Amino acid sequence: MSLSKYSFATIFTYGIVFFLPSAFVRAGLAVPATTIGYLAGAMIMFGLYFFQREPLAFEHKRSKPSAIVIYGLSGIILAILLQNVAVYIESLFGEVTASENTANIIQIILQQPLFALAAMVGGPIMEEFVFRRALVGIIGKYTHVWIGVVVSAFAFALAHNDGHILVYLFLGLFFSGLYAYTGSIWTSMITHVGMNTLVIIIQVLVQSGYIQVP
């Protein structure tokens, strides 16, 4: 499969998964549909990735598996620190509100725990394949790979649409940087999944009263 076909198929899959839950709203099944859709979408994208045969420029030199794991796990803490830096910068330009996306996700998980699989695993895996691999790849093919990185970071920020553009822009650039530095999409995927998982677990424990916040 060519890079163009792969990118189209990946983005098309993401679009279907993104809009699918709206068909189940009236039946009250939007959350289960989202959970199943995200996990199924992630599996389909795994298949598409292994089926394509056109690597990006920085994928020709890939780090060792041990390095990928180390950078991926280390990236979790760095991503959280970077997020805090972005929030601080945003605060210099006005009052910063809590992320509506995160708050909504936590409330859904508290009511339907299986949704955590969508938020912690399915969602970030799809986002890495779409925003890091597909968008960076297709834009970089016709312009320059780093133009693809910047455009995909902005697209990643706009897709979350909760008023924290700078946070998601920084994270998008950071995830792409991990990907480019190690030549492996698995690095940014480990970081993204790990970050979402850590944040969600902490937030759920706080909301449940197991962790007291001053």
Image (cartoon, rainbow, N blue to C red):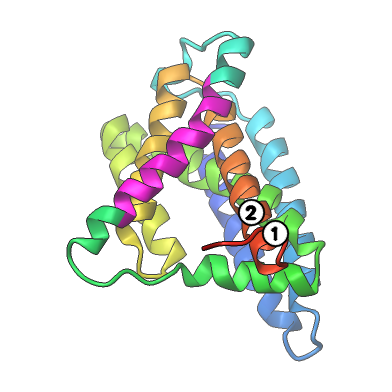
Please state the horizontal and vertical placement of residue 138, each as a whole percent of the image: 41, 39
Q: Quadrant of residue 118?
A: bottom right
Please state the horizontal and vertical placement of residue 137, each as a whole percent of the image: 43, 35
Residue 78 shown in magenta: yes
Q: Which residue is mark 1?
A: 205
Residue visible at 41% across and 20% down? 181
Q: Main secondary structure of the magenta part?
A: helix
Q: Is residue 214 left or right of residue 139?
A: right
Q: Quadrant of residue 28?
A: bottom right
Residue 147 shown in magenta: no
Q: Is residue 133 above or below residue 27?
A: above
Q: Secondary structure at mark 2?
A: helix
Q: Is residue 96 above or below residue 203?
A: below
Please state the horizontal and vertical placement of residue 85, each as a whole percent of the image: 31, 47
**Region in magenta:** 71-87
Mark 1 near mark 2, Cβ–Cβ under 8 Å? yes
Q: Secondary structure at mark 1?
A: helix
Residue visible at 48% across and 19% down? 183
Q: Amino acid at mark 1?
A: Leu
Q: Does the rendering let one see residue 153?
A: no
Residue visible at 27% across and 72% down? 95
Q: Amino acid at mark 2?
A: Ile
Q: Which mark is residue 202?
A: 2
Depth order, front residue of 196/16: 196
Depth order, front residue of 80/158: 80
Decide: few, some or many residues near mark 2? Use Cα within 10 Å; few <14, some 14-19, many ≥20: few
Q: Is residue 179 above or below residue 46?
A: above
